[in-house]
Amino acid sequence: MKEERQVLVIFPHPDDEAFGVSGTMAAHIANGTPVTYACLTLGEMARNVGNPPIATRESLPDIRKKELQEAADAIGLNDLRMMGFRDKTLEFLAPGVLKSVVEDLIEELNPSLVISFYPGYSVHPDHDATGEAVTEALADIPKEKRPTFYALGITLENPDIVYSVKEFTEQKLDALRAHYSQFGANNPEREEKYRSGDRDLVERLENERFFHFKFADD
């Protein structure tokens, strides 16, 4: 894994980090690299409220906030930003609002690597809106000063980068376990399958995949 000056992770929902990048985040933190996670919403409109239910629609935001902090602690993250936008509304924000948020974070942190969703290939409208804001903000930065952008493309195949995060799988499992309202019902079966050597799950948990986003002037 390449050494970075600062890593900035931007996702819309608590738990977006868990499967896709929690191992990578933990690895960078273990290497001494500062990592910031800007989570745009609290995922308060999620369909899951636990199985069996542990929340109501009214209590879910506080529960997911607590779960997100527990996941950050599991990863070893010290700089978690909860940005306060409303779940399932990001695509409807006025033009430039999210881009401005990304620009402010980049100006403050001066990251060498930004991780977010690949716009148009990330299934959820909030995911795509986040990825679009990141690409728009980064495109305005001169090539020689622009951070690298590693994107998660849920519906894309053949990623450019595959990181082995085997050393950090226990932290990744802890992060998944922290998001109990969303994953709690599946966690015991997932962990049992992983520890029994299920090939697909081992591959999914021990490796994280990214697309190196290319800009027009690259």
Image (spheres, rainbow, N blue to C red):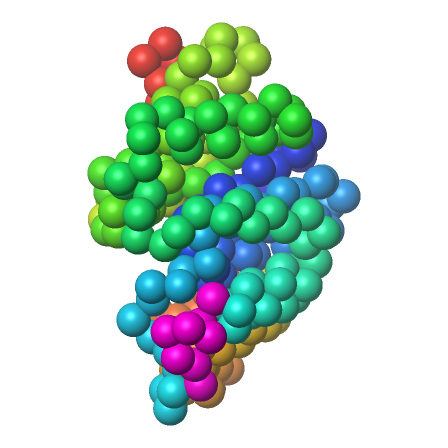
State the image coordinates of residue 150 (x, y, percent, origin top left).
45, 36
Q: Is residue 109 left or right of residue 202?
A: right
Residue 79 visible somewhere in the drawing: yes
In the picture, the quarter occupied by the C terminus is top left
Is residue 175 visible from the viewing direction of this image? no
Residue 57 covered by magenta stretch: yes
Which residues, given as a range, are shown in magenta? 54-61
Q: Position of residue 133 (x, y in %)?
A: 38, 30
Number of numbered discs present? 0
Residue plotted at (33% across, 43% down): 90
- Which residue is found at the position 52% from the left and 73% from the top? 63
Q: Nearer the viewer, residue 18 or 45?
A: 45
Could you say where residue 116 lies in the image, as x and y percent from the top left?
43, 41
Q: Main secondary structure of the magenta part?
A: loop
Where residue 194 sits: x, y (%)?
46, 78
Q: Residue at x 63, y 43 (%)?
A: 36
Task: Give the side of residue 123 with respect to residue 82, left or right.
Answer: left
Is-magenta flag for residue 100? no
Choose between 13 and 60: the one closer to the eye.
60
Above or below residue 42? Residue 50 is: below
| Residue located 45% across and 52% down the image | 41
Q: Quadrant of residue 22?
A: bottom right
Q: Quadrant of the N terminus?
A: top right
Residue 69 to residue 178: above or below: above
